[in-house]
Image (cartoon, helix red, strand yellow):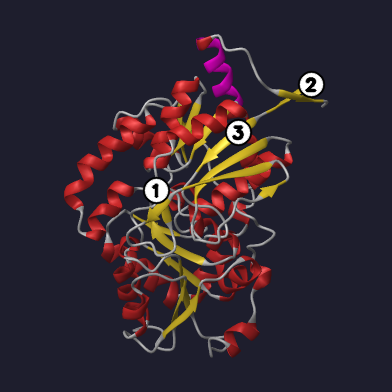
Amino acid sequence: MKKLLHIALVTETWRPEINGVAMTLGRLTDGLRQRGHRFTLVRPRQHAKDISATEENLTEILVGGCPLPGYRGLRFGLPSKSRLLEAWRSDRPDIIQVATEGPLGASAIAAAHTLDIPVASEFHTNFHAYSHHYGLGWLEGLVSAHLRRLHNKSAVTLAPTFAVANELRAKGYRSVRVVSRGVDTALFNPARRSDTLRASAWNVDKEQLVIAYVGRLAAEKNLPLVTRAFAAIRTVRPDARLLFVGDGPLRRELERSDAAYLFAGMRRDEDLATHYASADMFLFPSLTETFGNVTTEALASGLGVVAYDCAAAGELIRNGDNGRVVPSGEDALFISAAVELARNPELLTALRQRAANSVRHLDWTAISGDLDLLLRETIHTHERQHRIIPTFRFAPD
């Protein structure tokens, strides 16, 4: 007999919102639901017409929220302890999975403690690092202390990479475990390259070099280094073009900057995968990522990736084999690596050919299985320590 869990997932972001956290949570949740586990999703209402949805093995609880500064279209959840206590007393979860660390997540942890339900919290976003890019650097110490206190109230903190896990442990986080991120190689792969898209939408021919950046067009993504690297590339490849896929507060400024820039806006699913595969190189100089799903998507799409040796790139790219990584913060080396690939087509082709194969092992089914085992382990440990009678449903193997 296998145990089927009731998991309460608390998050400020959920599909169809386009960001790495929403995508990751959707993939992991789908994988666990396919295993028979049941979810109660707790999230803030994003707009007036936003209503609770019910899917197979998933029901929603919507709570109040407020706009998230700098992130148009996203809201953070307001404290909802009383609402959650009522809901979870009526339909008790086996574990609370807190994915975001705002007031809603903090109130969910408080409610879980009141009901003696174990909590697994997730570290997705470097909010303390983001604060520097929005003129709030003086808040970094306060934010860091808040995050540490919040995560240490949970039974386990889930980190996306071993580097992030080690960093959190060094800062005083307890019970940190790694659950990596996956990539859909059936969706993101080199076979989706489209000469038609390049010719009709981008007005480039087969020989022209297209440099891609995919992600939010915002200060924390270090976009000035993307444009500086592209300017250097044009000294050796004057006909190169820089493609931005995504949106954000810096788009208008970028649109006024250079006629060689291409803007595709927000893209989803197969359309997004085609945009990836139809480019040639991928520049990602962000220093604020905890993982960076776009890195794995670019590798799976067969692009020549240039990134700093942190987050996903630091763990997945073998420098000079399936991409290029340089020490974090070394702008000159980043630009030099990008120019090297641009001026050396044979090297770029070799890296691109090895990129897709290098991430084929990152299957979302396997990653969901890892999370399944870790949640069960957390519940078992909590029951042993607190002598709780299990409340699992059972289903035949």
Per the rendered image, the range of residues in magenta is 376-385
Give the amino acid type for the residue marked by disc 1 in the picture: Thr
Q: Which quadrant: the N terminus?
A: top right
Give the amino acid type for the residue marked by disc 3 in the picture: Ile
Mark 3 to mark 2 CA distance (whole Å): 19 Å
Circle 1 crowding by C-alpha within 10 Å: few under 14, some 14–19, many from 20: some
Q: Which quadrant: the C terminus?
A: top right
For the point 56% across and 26% down, the residue is 89
For the point 51% across and 11% down, the residue is 386
Q: Magenta stretch mostly in which secondary structure? A: helix
Vertical placement of residue 38 versus 334, above or below:
above
Look at the numbered disc 2 and give the secondary structure of its residue. loop
Q: Is residue 230 visible?
A: yes
Q: Which mark is residue 190?
A: none
Q: Considering only order in the chain, which callout, 3 or 1, is on the residue closer to the N terminus? A: 3
Name the foreground residue: 108 vs 227: 108
Was residue 382 drawn as part of the magenta stretch in this picture?
yes
Q: Nearer the viewer, mark 1 or mark 3?
A: 3
Q: Considering only order in the chain, which callout, 1 or 2, is on the residue closer to the N terminus? A: 2
Circle 2 crowding by C-alpha within 10 Å: few under 14, some 14–19, many from 20: few
Look at the numbered disc 1 and give the secondary structure of its residue. loop
Total marks placed: 3
Q: Considering only order in the chain, which callout, 2 or 3, is on the residue closer to the N terminus? A: 2
Image quarter of residue 341: bottom left
For the point 37% across and 27% down, the residue is 152
Q: Which mark is residue 1?
A: 2
Mark 2 to mark 1 CA distance (whole Å): 37 Å
Q: Which mark is residue 125?
A: 1
Q: Which residue is mark 3?
A: 7
